[in-house]
Amino acid sequence: MDKKERRMKRSYSIAVIPGDGTGQEVIREGLKVLEAVSDKFNFTYEKIIYDLGGERYLKTGETLPDSILEELKDVDAIYLGAIGDPRVKPGILEKGILLRLRFALDQYINLRPVILYDKRFCPLKDKNEEDINFVVVRENTEGLYCGAGGFLKYQTEDEVAIQESINTYKGVERTIRFAFDYAKKRNYKKKVTLCGKTNVLTYAFDLWERVFYKVAKEYPDIQTDYAHVDATCMWMVKNPEWFDVIVTDNMFGDIITDLGAIIQGGMGIAAGGNINPQGVSMFEPIGGSAPKYTGKNVINPLAAICALGMLLNYIGEEEASLSIERTVKRVVREKLESLSAGKMGMGTREVGDLIASLV
Ligand code: IPM
Ligand code: MN
C-alpha cells in the first residue's frame, strides 16, 4: 500500500525510535496509549521499531545507517523517544541521529506548543491556564545547526573556531509562511511574533525581518509583532499571554522552547513535532534521555503521550488526538501531584495505564 491508500484505509505505518535512557520508558507508555486509541477510534497501524541510539553505536559504531534512513522515507510518521547517552561524546548521537533525521527528511519546522494544563504546576506567579497558550514555530534545518564552520590552528593558542549561521531565503520564507498559516488555522489571537536579534545579527535577522513583513502582507487578518530574543525571554515570564504564534530561527527556538517547557509545567509535559508538511514528520517529547532517572519508573511519560497526540493529529486521526489531549489535561488536573520525575504520586507505567484506560 502506498501512503495515500494507507490514509484512506486508516491503516498507518509508524516508525518507532525509543532511543536512549528514559526514551525507552516513555515510548512504551505512548505505545500503550496508541493501542488504546486505535481500538477506540477504529484505525490500525503497523509499528516498525528501530534500535537507534547509544547502545547500537557502542556495539557497531553506527548512528543512522543509510538503509534505515531510506526506510523512514516511506512511513507515515516517526515516533521518537530521546537521543543522548552519557557513555558517548556529546554531539555524536545528537548530530548523527536526531539532527541527521531532521535534515535528511527536511523537517523544516519544529512545532512546539506551550500550554499550561494546570496552574498548580506553573512556576510563574499569578499566571493561569488562559495566560499560557502559545506555540513556537522553530526553523529546524538551518541557522547555527548546519555545522558550517571549522577550526584553524586547532589546539594551539592561536586557535580560531568558527560556527556560522546559515539563513536562506527559501528556508526563512517557508518557516514564516508556516507560522502565518498556523496562526490562521489556530484562529486564537491571530498574531505572529517574530523573535530575532535585529539590533546585532544585522545580516541574518535583516533577512528574517524583510521576509516576515513581506509574507505578512498576504495575511491581512493576522497581526504582527517583533521581539528581540532576550526580550522574548523576559515577556515569556512576565506576559506570556501576549503570545499566540512565535516564529524564530533554530538556535533561538531551541533556547526559548526550554523556557516555554518550564512555564507550562516542565519537560515532563512538553512535546514537539519535527514537521515536513510535504513529507515524513517526527514527533518527540522535547526533554532529553534523562540518564539519572532511567529504569526507575519515575519519569513523566506525558510529554511522549502528548507527542503521540500531535502525531495522530498530523496523520489525520484528529479525534484520537483530541481524546489524548483531553485525557492528559484531566489526568494532570485530577490525578497528579507534580509533573516532575519521581514526584507525580505515581510511576511512569501507572500514568501510562491510566491514560490508556481513560482515552
Ligand atoms: C532539542 C534538543 C536538540 C536540539 C539537541 C539534543 C540536539 O535540545 O530538540 O531541543 O538542540 O535541537
Ligand atoms: Mn533543546
Image (cartoon, helix red, strand yellow):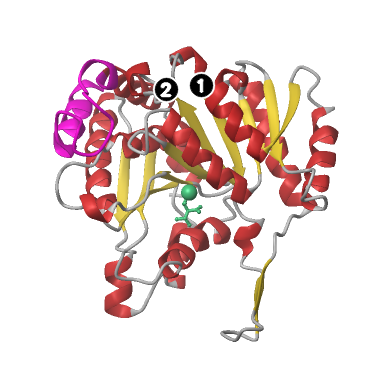
Residue placed at 49% from the left, 57% from the top? 73
**Residue 302 quadrant:** top left
Residue placed at 23% from the left, 53% from the top? 292
In the picture shown, does residue 17 fall above or below 219? below
Asked whether, in this view, residue 217 is left or right of residue 196, the answer is right
Asked whether, in this view, residue 211 is left or right of residue 306, the answer is right
Which residue has dot 1 on it? 133
Give how far apart the Cα atoms at labels 1 and 2 are: 7 Å
Give the magenta range.
331-359
Mark 1 and mark 2 residues within 8 Å of each other at the beta carbon: yes
Q: For the residue marked with disc 1, what is the amino acid?
A: Asn
**Would you say residue 346 sits in the magenta stretch?**
yes
Q: Secondary structure at mark 1?
A: strand
Which residue has dot 2 on it? 116
Instruction: Give me the disc on residue 21.
Output: none
Q: Within 8 Å of ligand 2, the CB of disc 2?
A: no
Q: For the residue marked with disc 2, what is the amino acid?
A: Leu
